[in-house]
Image (spheres, helix red, strand yellow):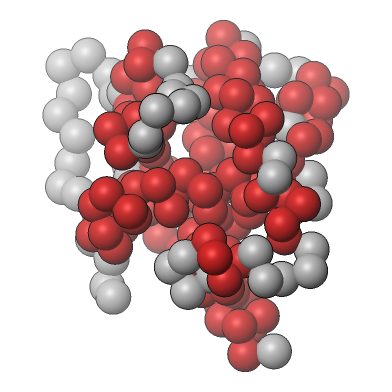
């Protein structure tokens, strides 16, 4: 019961941090759609991995509902790439976006985000995870740097996502810091 409330409290606090971070960018409509998808992955993934899973996927395998979603990760990561690619080419109309993200309903956002963060955590520790939480645009590149052989996000897409919200000639402001 305590973990449930901690998980939900995480959403409240992290949601405010993401709102402030979002306000520091000038996203195109396509980039805004990609940002919203990325932050949904990170919102659920971070609460699941850090709080519910106690910084390990092993803990999540003991929960009755979660192993089935973790088993779908090999399909969810390419689907995540597809949603981001299509959103950045769009934005997608609402109906198309809903269809493209349907694989993430239920616990798909949780499982995909927890897996990506666990891979980063394994190589870079909690500091690496916090870096991605502070700037969600970095998630694909950091995952690629940390992943063992297997699925990797398209490097061009990772670079494009990392540059979302930047305009030519504009310097990015000071980095957002967590108060933890």
**Rendered view: 6 above or below 133:** below
Of the pair 54 and 23, the residue shown nearer to us? 54
**Figure quadrant of residue 17:** bottom left
Of the pair 6 and 168, the residue shown nearer to us? 6
Q: Going 68% across and 30% down the picture, which residue do you hit?
A: 75
Q: In the displayed structure, does residue 114 sit left or right of residue 118? A: right
Query: Residue reaching furthest front?
Result: 149
Give the number of marks.
0
Q: Going 80% across and 34% down the picture, which residue do you hit?
A: 102
Q: Position of residue 14 (x, y in %)?
A: 46, 64
Q: Going 59% across and 37% down the picture, which residue do you hit?
A: 37
**In this view of the protein, can residue 84 be seen by the observer?**
no
Q: Position of residue 125 (x, y in %)?
A: 26, 59
Q: In the displayed structure, does residue 10 sit left or right of residue 158? A: right
Which quarter of the image is occupied by the C terminus?
Answer: bottom left
**Figure quadrant of residue 22:** top left
Q: In the displayed structure, does residue 169 sit left or right of residue 13? A: left
Q: Position of residue 63 (x, y in %)?
A: 71, 71
**In this view of the protein, can residue 82 be seen by the observer?**
yes
């Amino acid at each position: 019961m305590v973990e449930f409330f901690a998980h939900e409290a995480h959403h409240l606090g992290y949601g405010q941090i993401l709102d402030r971070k979002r306000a520091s960018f000038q996203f195109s409509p396509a980039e805004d759609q990609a940002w919203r998808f990325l932050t949904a992955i990170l919102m659920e993934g971070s609460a699941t991995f850090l709080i519910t899973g106690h910084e390990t996927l092993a803990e999540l395998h003991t929960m009755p509902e979660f192993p089935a979603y973790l088993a779908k990760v090999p399909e969810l990561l390419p689907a995540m790439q597809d949603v981001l690619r299509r959103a950045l080419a769009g934005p997608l109309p609402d109906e198309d976006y809903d269809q493209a993200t349907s694989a993430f309903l239920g616990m798909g956002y949780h499982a995909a985000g927890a897996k990506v963060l666990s891979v980063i955590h394994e190589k870079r520790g909690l500091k690496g995870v916090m870096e991605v939480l502070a700037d969600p645009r970095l998630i694909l590149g950091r995952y690629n740097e940390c992943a063992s052989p297997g699925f990797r996000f398209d490097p061009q897409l990772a670079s494009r996502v990392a540059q979302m919200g930047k305009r030519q000639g504009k310097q990015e402001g000071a980095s957002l810091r967590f108060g933890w």
